[in-house]
Image (tube, coloured by chain):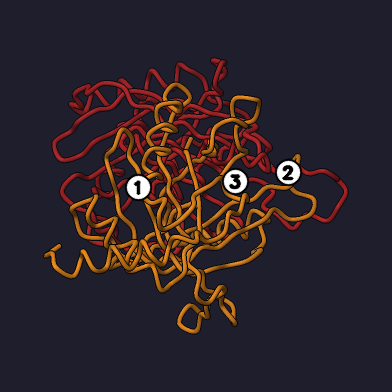
Chain colours: A red, B orange
């Protein structure tokens, strides 16, 4: 599977994300000759424990994340960030979680937007919105380099691409910038060879950042 | 959803059952070696306590893991009258760290068991699967190499078939009629309704084995 970096928009202090920024970012993708390839969407779900006694000491994961990716329609991914666990399952696992009635899905978010092709790169720029709502919670970007699946071997070319991208974006003088935080994949037992499990871990990292931004 | 019936057979007659199943199926048996871990939710977790099974298929070159949730049996007068149990069942293949995942969610190991035996699959009005296994318990945690049999001399026979809410009547009928083929060797009934071994088993087995002796299967 090709390597992918997931980046999130980090607004400058005092500013917030808005749809105008998203529009300008789409223009950036087109200005560097990105051709539109259709839409993409991922669905992220937060699960929280259902506790009989809220005051009893919690020996459970406080929350964990489920992820449905468009490129893997039959699969589902769970990430428990606190314990560095990422699990791959069939999409039927969602039905099992529902039947167990031990964890409940509390918040669901769409990551959705437009996909662009730029030579060997695939770029996805999109918004993070709660299901049944249009209120923008964040802006994300996925960059894929199609010829390589080794994180290490692709690092340099990815960095070079991101540099060009950041330069293009900076010309727009937008109130913020994209950030890439690479999780320590080995802590999750993942190797250098890229997989959808890596994507799930990156989504968890991006979500932690978005939540921290909102809190600040 | 699945339809299920179970029965027991003395180990000495298992070979005869295999001959019978082989004769009906026409394809070789599938070897079964499954490490089954039954997990239960911790004391404070969930609306009600819940149970989930993790199955590790040890017959695969790389052991593969499945999560299985078995729900409640169908109830009501209609369900009482049929001789097959109809229950909800959901399965999902999962990556190998699934035990760690469920521990992190607050599930605890209730018991574990190693099932060893064989299975046959049939397409007879439904996708029927017959598994014949001996249950083995581990004396030490996860020590599958040192497992000892739980019921010496007895093996479990399980007949299952996937069904849906619309189709279960036909699947029940298919499973019931399939069970008749096995009737001389064993009684099959709803799980939990034990009917013991059948008195005709020894004679039926002897007859099957003598027939099998002269044929190439």
Q: Secondary structure at mark 1?
A: helix
* Mark sitting on residue B46: 2
Mark 3 neighbour density, 10 Å: few (under 14) some (14–19) many (20 or more): many
Chain letter of the residue beneath label 3 in the structure image: A
- Taking the spot 13% from the left edge, 36% from the top edge, the residue there is A119
Residue with the most extreme bottom position = B146
The answer for which chain carries disc 1 is B
Which residue reaches farthest right? A55
Residue B189 in view of the camera: yes
Q: Nearer the viewer, residue A54 or B85?
A: B85
Kindly give the residue lying farthest to the left in the view shown.
B216
Asked if disc 3 and disc 2 are in contact, CB closer than 8 Å, the reply is: no
For mark 3, what is the residue? A64
Quadrant in the picture for the C terminus of chain A: top right
Residue at x 64% of width, y 64% of height:
B109
Q: Is residue A103 left or right of residue B123?
A: right
Image disc number at residue B210 = none
**Residue B127 in the image: above or below residue A132:** below
């Amino acid at each position: 599977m090709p390597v992918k970096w997931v980046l999130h928009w980090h607004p400058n202090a005092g500013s917030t994300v808005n749809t105008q920024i998203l529009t300008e970012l789409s223009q950036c993708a087109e200005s560097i000759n990105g051709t539109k390839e259709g839409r993409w969407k991922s669905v992220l779900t937060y699960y929280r424990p259902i506790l009989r006694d809220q005051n009893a000491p919690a020996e459970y994961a406080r929350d964990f994340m489920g992820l449905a990716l468009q490129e893997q329609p039959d699969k589902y991914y769970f990430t428990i960030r606190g314990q560095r666990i990422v699990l791959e399952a069939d999409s039927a696992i969602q039905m099992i979680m529902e039947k167990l009635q031990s964890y409940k899905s509390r918040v669901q978010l769409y990551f959705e937007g437009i996909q662009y092709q730029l030579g060997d790169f695939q770029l996805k720029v999109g918004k993070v919105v709660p299901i049944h709502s249009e209120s923008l919670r964040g802006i994300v970007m996925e960059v894929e380099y199609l010829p390589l699946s080794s994180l290490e071997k692709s690092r340099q070319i990815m960095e070079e691409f991101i540099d060009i991208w950041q330069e293009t974006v900076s010309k727009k003088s937008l109130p913020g910038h994209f950030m890439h935080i690479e999780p320590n994949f080995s802590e999750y037992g993942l190797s250098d060879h890229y997989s959808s499990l890596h994507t799930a871990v990156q989504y968890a990292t991006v979500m932690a950042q978005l939540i921290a931004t909102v809190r600040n | 959803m699945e339809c299920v019936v179970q029965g027991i057979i003395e180990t000495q007659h298992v070979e005869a059952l295999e001959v019978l199943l082989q004769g009906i199926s026409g394809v070789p048996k599938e070897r079964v070696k499954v490490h089954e871990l039954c997990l239960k939710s911790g004391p404070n977790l969930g609306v009600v306590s819940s149970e989930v099974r993790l199955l590790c298929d040890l017959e695969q070159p790389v052991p593969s893991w499945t999560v299985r949730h078995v729900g409640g049996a169908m109830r009501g007068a209609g369900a009482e009258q049929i001789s097959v149990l109809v229950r909800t069942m959901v399965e999902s293949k999962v990556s190998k760290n699934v035990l760690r995942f469920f521990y992190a969610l607050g599930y605890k190991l209730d018991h574990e068991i190693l099932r060893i035996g064989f299975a046959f699959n049939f397409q007879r009005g439904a996708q029927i699967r017959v598994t014949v296994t001996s249950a083995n318990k581990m004396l030490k945690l996860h020590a599958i190499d040192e497992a000892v049999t739980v019921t010496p001399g007895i093996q479990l026979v399980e007949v299952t078939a996937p069904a849906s809410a619309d189709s279960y009547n036909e699947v029940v009928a298919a499973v019931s009629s399939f069970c008749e083929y096995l009737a001389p060797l064993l009684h099959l009934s709803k799980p939990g309704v034990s009917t013991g071994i059948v008195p005709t088993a020894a004679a039926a087995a002897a007859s099957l084995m003598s027939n099998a002796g002269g044929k190439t299967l």
